[in-house]
Image (cartoon, rainbow, N blue to C red):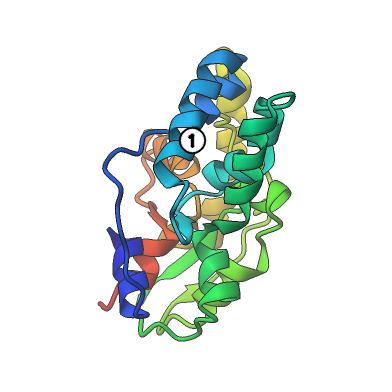
Amino acid sequence: MAMVEVLERLGFEVEFRAAQTCCAQPAFNSGYHTEARAVARHFLDVFSDAETIVVPSGSCTSMITHHFEELFAGDAKQLERVRTIAPRVYEFSRFLVDVAEAGDLGARFPHKVTYHDSCHALRDLQLKAPPRALLSKVKDLELIEMETAEECCGFGGTFSVKFAGISGAMARTKMDSIVKTGASYVVSLDSSCLMQLRGALSRAGHKIETIHLAEVLASRD
């Protein structure tokens, strides 16, 4: 809803297609490629005629633009559909910076925040500068970079279940770095990372909140 508010503020007409489900990443990452292909085909069916698809998740964007081709290798018909739709798929912050050429969105967020670079957004999509550029335009926001901004939070979908000990250790390392900044909020592009970090912070008794970039940009308080 925050993403929609920001896009509409910029004058875009936003359509939410109720038939949409998943990008297929959970099944794909777990090795269930037959099931993942079924979900991916549904995505292609739902969005095939969409002018532009804006996604509030680096990991979902990466799945569609980087891994759908791998899923449909050898299937010429589906590969053509993937190659037609992929250039129209944008992660939210990249769309704002590269397409909308947005600067000051009129947002105000009077808090100290630190930013977590989610793995797919940073490594697959090379999204380091766009979210920071957007945060720099938010009135009364102070961005304090953590030492481990580019390190994984330890979630990784089923990784956190299969390797709980490693996942927890990674989350605690990240948490310690967050706490050192003195920030009140952790901002990221991926809700899965924010869920992982929120869990670690709350279990440790810290009052630091997690928040998606879109929520910051939609804020006027």
Residue 192, image x and y in percent?
A: 46, 39
Please tell me which residue lies in front, 78 or 24.
78
Which of the image's four quarters has the N terminus?
bottom left
Residue 79, image x and y in percent?
A: 67, 35
| Residue at the spot 57% in from the left edge and 49% down from the top edge | 85
Q: Amino acid at mark 1?
A: Cys
Residue 132 appearing in the image:
yes
- The quadrant holding residue 4 is bottom left
| Residue at the spot 63% in from the left edge and 56% down from the top edge | 87
Please tell me which residue lies in front, 99 or 169.
99
Q: State the count of labels.
A: 1
| Residue at the spot 45% in from the left edge and 53% down from the top edge | 56
Residue 178, image x and y in percent?
A: 54, 52
Q: Is residue 182 left or right of residue 216?
A: right
Which of the image's four quarters has the C terminus?
bottom left
Relative to 186, does residue 220 appear above or below in the rendering? below
Residue 119 appearing in the image:
no
Residue 92, image x and y in percent?
A: 49, 61
Residue matched to label 1: 23
Q: Is residue 22 left or right of residue 120?
A: left
Around disc 1, counting alpha carbons within 10 Å, would you say few (fewer than 14), some (14 to 19), or many (20 or more)? many
Relative to 91, does residue 217 appear above or below in the rendering? below
Please tell me which residue lies in front, 158 or 83.
83
Relative to 189, does residue 155 appear above or below in the rendering? above
| Residue at the spot 56% in from the left edge and 47% down from the top edge | 61
Assign a secondary structure to mark 1: loop
Relative to 66, does residue 141 appear above or below in the rendering? below
